[in-house]
Amino acid sequence: MRKLKLFVILLFLSFTIAAGISSCRSDEDEIIPPTETEVTPGEDGFVKGFFLLNEANMGSNKASLDYFDYESGKYFKNIYPIINPSVVKELGDVGNDIQIYGNKLYAVINVSGYVEVMNKITGKHENEIVVKNCRYITFNKGYAYISSYDSEVKITPDAPIGCVVKVDTTTMKEVGRCFVGYQPEQMVIRDNKLYVANSGGYRVPDYDNTISVIDLNTFTETKKITVAINLHSMTLDSSDNIYVSSRGDYKNIKSNTYILGKNDLVTKTLNQPCSQMTVCGDSIYMLSVEWNHITESNAVSYAIVDTKTQNVVSRNFITDGTDKKIKVPYGLAINPKTREIFVTDAKDYVSPGTLYCFTPQGKKKWEVTTGDIPAHIVFTQTRFENTNILKEN
């Protein structure tokens, strides 16, 4: 039962713990120094490296940032505190998303209620954007759009609707706020419109089932599109079709993935569960860990969808048996140039996880220990300059 409880805590993320969790670590907490691990011979190509944001278990205030450098082939764990010694006690509670825009690195820290803004070349703190119960971030024409539950961390039938906060990336100031559905999650932009997946997770079992459409010219919600309950992940294919996942109700309604055509209608149901998805060329890779409260078991899949045919062409993109070692697959990313596949393992949610790198054919190249609950990866085309500082410590 302990394993089940740990899984549920992370699955529901910020709607299984009561409100009032501290958003920063105490002065007495030990700061874990960075570590360096050489995992592969050096490569120096189009992609210089990537940052990995570790969520860490809610309430632990141990969100952390790792970096992999392709040129040296070295993985640097927990880089933030040594680069930012004057920032009190690291990143905070639950790292929920990480993205690069311009010369800035943005880390969304969910329960702590802010977006950490760093220089993408040095990793140094530059600013922060305060957004209550923030979830995900995307960018367009000089603005950041941040989805927010806009409420305390609490399951309740009275949970309010969420919003999207618009921030000027020059001033880092909020310039607008648009209310959408209940507990909004990931977003995509198509035809100057922002599409927002509404989950309704705080209102379980009365989940939301809509996608909100926001006109970016007026920053107002123009309509809601009914899709399925408990929506979460979203991505665009090369033809501007929107893929959106439903997490179901973890009981009788299974997770599924839907395609929203350019006419804003659901054009296909893939009958493929999905926890995370990412696009690479004409393929969408999907990772699914589907827990069922009735059977008390997980159903795991690693699928590939051909976006030209809109069909699932593989149910397991890990081909060498390594998937049997992975306890709880959690994060997923594809190198856009080499097409290397990265999968993270959250293990038991309270101890360091593992990052696996696979060839495009699904054969393991290397693995490395990460922070707690490794979850979100963003690739950078500019090499990180502070690796010498990390090596010295």
Image (tube, helix red, strand yellow):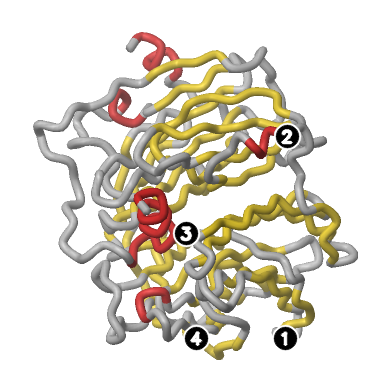
Q: Residues within 10 Å of mark 3 (few under 14, many from 20)?
A: many
Q: Quadrant of residue 272?
A: bottom right
Q: Quadrant of the N terminus?
A: bottom left
User: Which amino acid type is shown beneath numbered disc 2?
Assistant: Gly
**Callout 1 secondary element:** loop
Q: Please, is residue 197 above or below residue 52 in the view?
A: below
Mark 4 lies on residue = 221
Mark 3 lies on residue = 137
Q: Earlier in the sequence, mark 4 or mark 2?
A: 4
Residue 198 position within the rendered picture, expressed as x and y whole percent measured from the top left: 49, 77
Mark 1 lies on residue = 265
Of the residues tagged 4 and 1, which is closer to the observer?
1
Residue 368 visible at all: yes
Name the mark on residue 300: none
**Callout 2 secondary element:** loop
245 sits to left or right of 241? left
Residue 53 visible at all: no
User: Which amino acid type is shown beneath numbered disc 4?
Assistant: Glu
**Callout 4 secondary element:** strand
Q: Earlier in the sequence, mark 2 or mark 1?
A: 1
Q: How many marks?
A: 4
